[in-house]
């Protein structure tokens, strides 16, 4: 499930991003848009209109910078292998054609980056969602507690 979700979240929209190089096609529309100063300015203006002035630390600008910094940690070669696994090994069940994959450590790192991106957006947009950085570890421990007695 993690492979499917990570690949979906990072899947690119090359038809929407005509100036992209082949390697940049994995950039999502939202993430690509957040790199643009005009989009950042519009988002900051919208948030000020919706939530008022930005008085607290970290500032909204700081959160946008944090988002960009976290986004830059994505290893696009790992994503390329993950997408290959998703397309051939999961979505179309052609295991004989799967030539590239990802390690659990790589997948865990990608999930960690996405969680940090989501946390930053959650803070920036002041959403009512309740994602916490410790959620994946807590879920992993709960699953282990259920699965171990079964074996």
Image: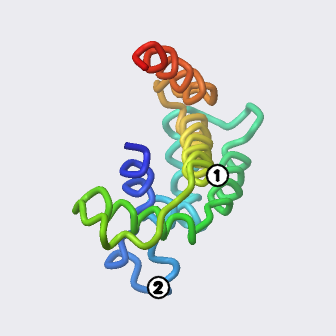
Q: Residue furthest front?
A: 151
- Quarter occupied by residue 126: top right
Q: Is residue 44 above or below residue 95?
A: above
- Residue 1 lies left or right of residue 22; in this view the side is left
Which label was assigned to residue 22?
Answer: 2
Eye-nearest disc, 2 or 1? 2
Q: CA distance from mark 2 to mark 1?
A: 23 Å
Q: Residue at x 44, y 64 (%)?
A: 28
Colour treatment of the image: rainbow
Quadrant where the C terminus sits is: top left
Dividing the image into 4 quarters, which one contains the N terminus? top left
Dot 1 falls on a residue whose secondary structure is helix
Residue 67 image position (x, y, % from top left): 64, 52
Dot 2: element:
helix
Instruction: Tell me the residue at 67%/53% (across/down).
Output: 70
Mark earlier in primary sequence (2, 1): 2
Residue at numbered disc 1: 67
């Amino acid at each position: 499930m993690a492979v499917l979700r990570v690949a979906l979240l990072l899947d690119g929209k090359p038809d929407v991003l005509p100036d992209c190089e082949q390697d940049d096609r994995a950039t999502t529309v939202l993430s690509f848009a957040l790199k643009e100063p005009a989009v950042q300015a519009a988002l900051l203006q919208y948030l000020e209109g919706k939530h008022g002035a930005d008085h607290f630390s970290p500032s909204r600008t700081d959160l946008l910078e944090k988002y960009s910094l976290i986004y830059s940690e994505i290893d696009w070669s790992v994503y390329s292998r993950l997408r290959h696994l998703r397309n051939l090994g999961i979505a179309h069940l052609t295991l004989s054609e799967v030539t590239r994959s990802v390690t659990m450590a790589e997948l865990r790192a990608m999930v960690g980056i996405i969680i940090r991106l989501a946390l930053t957006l959650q803070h920036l947009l002041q959403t009512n969602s309740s994602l916490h950085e410790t959620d994946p570890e807590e879920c992993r421990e709960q699953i282990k507690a259920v699965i171990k007695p079964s074996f």
